[in-house]
Amino acid sequence: STLEVLGGFEDCSALAHITIPDGVRVVNSAFTNCVSLTEITIPDSVQTVADDTFRGCTALREVHLSASIKRIGKQVFGECTSLRHVDLPAGLEEIADSAFIACGIEEITIPEGVTSIGALAFSNCTKLTGVRVPAYSPYAVAEHAMSIIMAANRRLHKAINRVRDNNFSLDGLMGVDLHNKVAGIIGTGQIGQCFARICKGFGMTVIAWDVYPNQKLVD
């Protein structure tokens, strides 16, 4: 097929089935409010599912996404209340704003390659009980944990409130040095390893435990 951009079936309330031809690269708002559509397969040629493509398809129960899709646009599955599960392709990079808003999905796995999840992407998904993120930034989590420790140690929350009241007293805000203190870490996975290295950077002694000891970390 020479067709590359597919659209134009909005509000076809009786449309129950359609076959998207190979060669289509963009599905562009094609099936908005097709309330009888129950299942659709997107061919491997498709790279982008554009904004509103399946929004309001309340009977849609099964979606088979192509492995080459890089972006899921805004409100693509918005208000698809019968949709319970979507297998997101491994090559997906972006889930746009409100992509699944008010959708009926119950669980979802975010692929490793996703670098952006937009605002309200899963807002009002009242049946959603599980989100699995197999890849993340362990550095971000470990650094956030250390920032919480430092804030608690120096009583930053109290210090901020005092400054707002024009009180610059240091009474009770001094905290202690982390240098030469002992850090206990339970779990030496990716996050635990990053946190251990951060603690060592502060000059702390690190004691860690894991069901599966990590000799590489010890060395």
Image: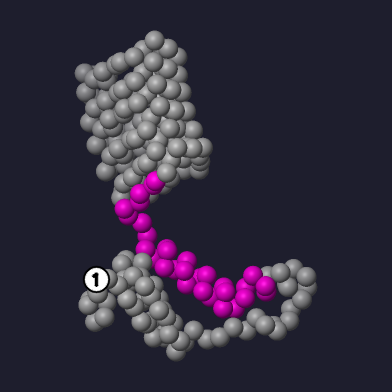
Position of residue 115 measured from the top left corner of the image (x, y, whole percent): 38, 49
Instruction: Name the quadrant containing residue 46.
Output: top left
* Residue 212 located left or right of residue 124: left
Q: Nearer the viewer, residue 101 or 210?
A: 210
Residue at image coords 27%, 43%: 91
Q: Main secondary structure of the magenta part?
A: helix
**Residue type indicated by callout 1:** Tyr
Local secondary structure at mark 1 = loop
Q: Which residue is mark 1?
A: 212
Position of residue 118 measured from the top left corner of the image (x, y, whole percent): 46, 43
Q: Residue furthest bottom?
A: 180
Please rate how many residues cluster around mark 1, counting C-alpha atoms within 10 Å: few if below 14, some from 14 to 19, many from 20: few
Q: Residue furthest right?
A: 166
Q: Quadrant of the C terminus?
A: bottom left
* Residue 106 located left or right of residue 214: right
Residue at image coords 24%, 74%: 213
Q: Quadrant of the N terminus?
A: top left
Residue 7 in sight here: no
Which stretch appears magenta? 130-159
Instruction: Name the quadrant containing residue 198.
Output: bottom left
Residue 193 higher or lower than 38, as above or below: below
Q: Nearer the viewer, residue 58 or 96?
A: 58
Position of residue 176 measured from the top left corner of the image (x, y, whole percent): 56, 86
Residue at image coords 53%, 75%: 150
